[in-house]
Image (cartoon, rainbow, N blue to C red):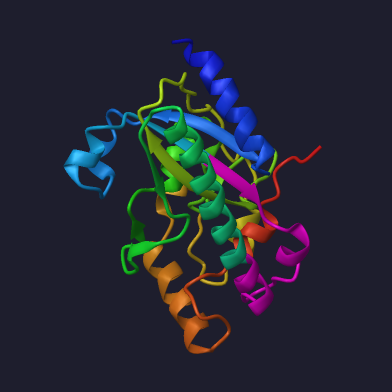
Amino acid sequence: MDKKKIYLQLQKFCLQQGVDLFGVADISKEKGDIRLAPRSLEKVDKAICLGIRLSAGILGELEQVPTRLYFHHYRTLNGLLDQTALKVTNFIQNKGFCAIPIPASQIMDWQKQTAHLSHKKIAFLAGLGWIGRNNLLVNKKLGSQFRLSTILTDMPLKTDKPVDENCGGCALCAAVCPAQAIHKDPAQFDHIKCFEKLKEFQKQHLVEQYICGVCVNVCKGKIP
């Protein structure tokens, strides 16, 4: 089978569904970090990453705290990604291959902030960006202003490669972080400070879920 041809067919289908970011990662060496039954992981060796852009207007409402408007938008976009991933899953299954859609936002352990897998890691492996100072995926064009979902599959697809890029001298996210969890060195991101601030926002009844978005608002990328 022509892996590139199948890749382009799938990419076209995904873009027709309104997807802004599309990439395919080789996960043959990443299965130890995916929380699924071993028998399910045996069937798959690739991960399709989908990204849909957030509303810049809604993000613009954020200053030092999350808003209910952003919370609603966040949930709506996660739902849209899940619905889109289901359509892509059916497309793949109708071609005779295995497809396992992973929810855009289903946390298994809030304290450790872990899910079935790391969408941002898959996106990095799929060449969609790099892990920034804000501990999020940063895309060259969209910054961090998007949400992600993943579909695991055995479909014969060409795979993308990670990009060799970084945030350079930009540290806007560190300047605005209400938890002071972001530092110039991405490796120094303070997960505990970030999580404690998310809990504080929830206790203040600003939002019903552990989200913030303040750093996302300033991470805009280079949109033409």
- The answer to whether residue 206 is above or below residue 30 is below
The vertical placement of 212 against 163, above or below, is: below
For the C terminus, the quadrant is: top right
Q: Residue furthest left?
A: 38
Q: Which residues are magenta?
A: 50-73
Q: Residue at the spot x=51%, y=59% of the render?
A: 182
Q: Is residue 51 magenta?
A: yes
For image coordinates 47% across by 15% down, the residue present is 3
Q: Is residue 140 visible?
A: no
| Residue drawn at x 67%, y 56% as measured from the top left | 54
- Is residue 130 in view from this perspective? yes
Report x, y in % for residue 188. 41, 53
- The correct choice, above or below, for 44 with respect to 191 in the image is above
Q: Residue at x 48, y 40 (%)?
A: 90
Horizontal side of residue 95 vs 33, given as left or right = right
Q: Nearer the viewer, residue 158 or 200?
A: 158
Q: Residue 106, how many percent across, how many down?
A: 40, 62
